[in-house]
Amino acid sequence: MPVVSYPVLRSILEHIEANCRFSLSGRCPEISRVEKNIPLRVKQILLSDNSFSINDIKYKAFFEVPRMRIIYTLLPISMPKHPLTLRIYDFNTKLFVERKFSRNYGIEGALRKVMEYFLGGRSNIHVQQVTVFDNGETVQYLFGLSNLKVSVLDYSHFDVPIFHPLVESSPLKEIHFSVSHPSDFENPLVRTAETILITDYYYEEPENWLETHRNLPNKEVIIRTDDHGFTDISILELIEYWRETRRVIGSSFSIFKPYGDSIEKFMENVKERFQGTYVELKATNTKTFFNINAVSIKVDSESKIVVYGGKTDYWPEGISKVVIKVIAVGSSAEIQEEETEPLEEPKIVPRMHLNYNAIE
């Protein structure tokens, strides 16, 4: 068998799925010696209280008690004879393996050790999305492990973090968060992200809505909740402000309209107020967005605002969605809704081979 040169091996390993790459490294000492110097690409890291996942493999630490399969962190850690267990679960095969740890670690220590084993000491890690569940304490285990570059940070169930070492080096492509106060929009993580996705509001100041949202510097703003208190008048005022200030081409703002609001009436109001015209839009994906009306509003010789709205089955029946988008004159607006990932062909998942001695 011909010997594979390092440049070729580097190119191959960089594009192998992360868990498959870990498996190869555990089986082959030659690969293990160079593998951490090659950039690692990860689709998703999920972080919870007593577990984390890398793509389709989940790592959970717990204390196992006879006749009680799993006892979580509420169990006193000092109890003897209750071994700390690491469970590795594969979402593809629905199979899992377990490994007993030294009692000296505790749950936090064990998870940190496993995370260091896989992600520590690397020259570069590109993560498409980091999602934080529960109180997200395990996220701190990633701090300082490697040069981590994150595209999307999902803090949907929490306030946006004031400071986050994971993403301090480069702006996020997208951040998901809940807003507890208007000052959250001044957070550097929010202001520098290309797209912000708001999942909930925990304050009520409808009189300040326009002032808070009209000057957001992000290219795309997505409000994915109907519990926001925004009115048709507020949305019309936002459109007016964007037209007066000549918002940059490519800017986009989308919002759900609550139950009972007529999207047809709203679009008619948009047409009349801004002397717009109804237009046809090119639809690339309308699986979750249908019965769409669109109005084009002239801004200047270079740009125009297209406002379109329709029913959506992303939320229960009765919810409508409005999108405000600035496009170049002469170009056609295109509806590009959030796509669901296509079903993957069945694939062979390599059996996980880990050097547990290295972890312990």
Image: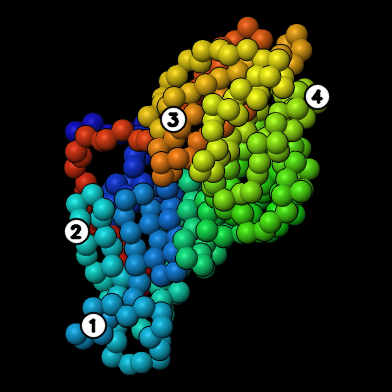
Q: Is residue 147 visible?
A: no
Q: Earlier in the sequence, mark 3 or mark 4?
A: 4
Disc with the residue nearer the chain's start (2 vs 3): 2
Please give the name of the residue rendered at 41% of the width and 83% of the height, measured from the top-left corner.
74
Q: CA distance from mark 2 to mark 1?
A: 20 Å
Dot 4 or dot 1: first in sequence order is 1
SS for dot 1: strand
Residue type (three-letter) at the residue carrying disc 2: Leu
As drawn, the label of residue 68 is 1
Label of residue 95 in the image: 2
Percent across and percent down for residue 49 are 44, 69
Q: Is residue 167 left or right of residue 30?
A: right
Q: Disc 2 and disc 3: Cα gap in Å?
A: 37 Å
Which numbered tag is attached to residue 313?
A: none
Mark nearer the viewer, 3 or 1: 3
Q: Amino acid at mark 4?
A: Glu
For label 3, the residue is 289
